[in-house]
Amino acid sequence: MIRVFDTKEELGEAAVDLFVERNRVAKATFSVALAGGSTPKAVYELLAKPENANRVDWGKTMCFWGDERWVPPSDDQSNEGMARKALLDHVPISPSQIWPMFGVDETPEDGARRYETTLRGQFPNPDETFDLLLLGIGTDGHTASLFPGDRASLSADAWVVPTTSPAGVPQRLSLTPAALWAASLTVFMVVGPDKALPLSRVLTDGSDLPAAVVARNSRDVIWLLDREAASLVQF
Ligand code: 6PG
C-alpha cells in the first residue's frame, strides 16, 4: 500500500496512528524495530507528545532497532541516542523493554552475535519477528544499514550483521532481510525531493536496491510518502 501526504506533518500523524493501532491490537507484547534518520526522528518526536504517547500501552512495548551506527548512545550519530532523546526518555517504558544494539567494549561482530541471540530468543518462530518495523530509505536506495552492492548482507541467513556505510559513521550493525521480511507490518517513511529518484528506482520492478529487496518480500508493507518524495513514482 502506498499513501501520499501533502505534508511531512500529515505523514507523521499517519505514522503515529499506525504505531498506536498496531500497539492496540498486539496481544501480550508489542515489538517495534526503530529506524534512524531525520524522517523517523520527526515521527518519534510527534509520538512523544502526551496526546499521542497516552494512546500507547508502553507496558507491553518492546523496543528494538533495525540498525545502528557503531558509536555510543551519547554520540549525536547514534540511532539509540536519537530515539531516546526524541521518544524513549519521554514515555513510561521500562529500561528492561529497550534492547539497544550498541555494546560498550564490543566489536561490531560481537554486537551482531549478541543481538542475534537476543532476537532469536524474543522471536522463536523465524517467520514472525516484529509487530511493527519502521524504516527509511537513503538517497542511494539503502534501508536500515543495508547498502547497495553488499550482496552478502542481503542474502545472509543471519538476522544481524556488521556492515560498512559509504557515508557517515562507517561501522554499522544492521538487521538483514531474513529478519526484516518476517515483521508483521513494515512501514517505510520517505520524505523530500531528494528521495524522489531513489524511491522511483526502489519501486521499479526488479530493482536490486536494498530497500526494494526488503520491501518486495515483506509480509505487509505500507509506504508513507510526502508529495515531493512521490513525485516520480508511477502510479
Ligand atoms: C540510518 C537509518 C537509515 C535511514 C535512512 C533515511 O541509520 O541512517 O537507519 O536507514 O532510515 O537513511 O534517513 P533520513 O530520513 O534522514 O533521510
Image (spheres, rainbow, N blue to C red):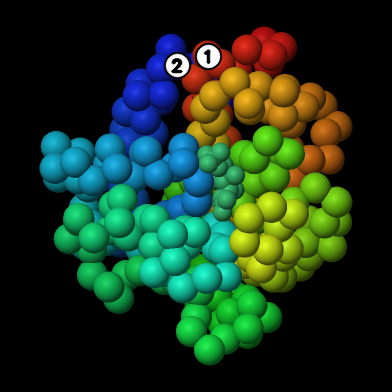
Mark 2 vs 1, N-terminal side: 2
Location of residue 159 in the rendering, given as x and y in whole percent from the top left corner: 66, 67
In this picture, residue 202 sits left or right of residue 57 = right
Mark 1 residue crowding within 10 angstroms, few (<14) / some (14–19) / many (20+):
many
The reply, left or right, for residue 3 in relation to residue 161 is left
Q: Tell me, yes or no, if residue 128 can be seen here.
A: no
Q: Residue at x 41, y 17 (%)?
A: 7
The N terminus - image quarter: top right
Q: CA distance from mark 2 to mark 1?
A: 6 Å
Q: Amino acid at mark 1?
A: Arg
Q: Which mark is residue 111?
A: none
Q: Judge whether 82 appears above or below 15 on screen.
A: below
Residue under circle 1?
Answer: 227
Where residue 29 sits, quadrant-wise, is bottom left
Mark 1 lies on a secondary structure that is: loop
Is the distance from the Cβ of mark 2 to the nearest ligand 1 atom less than 8 Å? no
Viewer-proximal residue, 159 or 200? Answer: 200
Q: Which residue is mark 2?
A: 5
- Disc 2 is placed on an element classified as strand
Q: Is residue 213 above or below residue 117?
A: above
